[in-house]
Amino acid sequence: MALYDVSTLPIEDFLNYSPSLALAIIAMTLFFLGGVAIAYKTWRRPYRFMHTMTAVACFESAGYACLVYDVIMQVFVIMAPNIIQATLYWTVGIVLKFSPDLTAGRRMLQGWLITTLFCTSDILGITIQTIGISIWASSQSSGDPDEEQIHKGSVITLIGLCLQIIFFFFFTILTIWTHRHQKMALRGRRGTGKLFLGIYLTMVLLYIRNTFRLIEFAQDTILSWPAPEGTYVLSHQQVLFYTLDTLPILMTFAVLLWAHPGSLLPPPGSVLAPAGAHNVVYDPEDPCEGKEASMAAGASAGSLQSEAFKVTVA
């Protein structure tokens, strides 16, 4: 295979399309603004784990800033969205932490353990993908592209994506089960429906993006390098990249700004009434508030019993 000088290699020859500087700038700007907005909203809320989304915005902005100049920086664009999944793991873990009746007798469903387990699986998938995409990109941009190394990088990246999607599928099942369970302590609480709707919408957007990446690298694994002339290669289509990767990830920022877990989860340290009981959040730092709410709930229940008694006597 002929050698070439990387310093003089046009980015068009590497990507097989002419990258749009305007689209890259728009994407970089939108991710930056989304990161600033979510950082500000997280700063005003008690849960700091949502700064994971701030990190995603930083990586995405850096990736798009260098997309048309440095091939290796594409690693940021490909890897950063995986951190969004950790945000969802953390959110559902907190929901389980607030639901002791649901997790009682189920050691594997402890909130901290769920978060740790799925975040560890995510780190494993990210690590494998990082290794694969680094081999893939560095070989193509080395000046002496090695077809075997490029194929190896695609296979390793594909394995990482498969593991990530498999674990995310199991997490999706767990989330639906938690949401529908009668002993989930947030059931009936104001904002719970919005919280889970935000989680589900984010999941759908991540499935769209991950499926696109899975098919893309599966195709790169099957095809020879360079691909036969006339072949429709997904990785060579700029419109698909911005439609099925950039747009879904941008939309996750919009969703999580609308359904910010820090605004919808009970404050840390709160004690929730058991699922099915009166829906009160007791704040240990303000016992009077909890007492008044409990008395109000009791009074309401007493009123209902009194009305029922009157009906019976009548």
Image: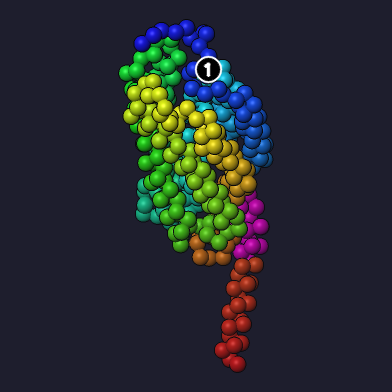
Q: Nearer the viewer, residue 206 or 22?
A: 22
At 51% from the left edge and 34% from the top edge, which residue is drawn? 240
Could you tell me which secondary element the residue under label 1 belongs to?
helix
Q: Nearer the viewer, residue 231 or 224?
A: 231
Q: Nearer the viewer, residue 279 or 191?
A: 191
In the figure, residue 124 lies in which quadrant? top left
At 63% from the left edge and 55% from the top edge, which residue is drawn? 287
At 48% from the left edge and 9% from the top edge, which residue is drawn? 6
Q: Nearer the viewer, residue 134 or 101?
A: 134
- Give the residues drawn in magenta, as a range: 281-295
Residue 266 image point, x, y percent: 58, 51
Residue 235 image point, x, y percent: 46, 28
Which residue is disc 1 drawn over? 11
Q: Is residue 33 left or right of residue 15?
A: right
Magenta segment's dominant SS is: helix
Q: Is residue 202 left or right of residue 22?
A: left
Res 124 visible? no
Residue 1 image point, x, y percent: 36, 11
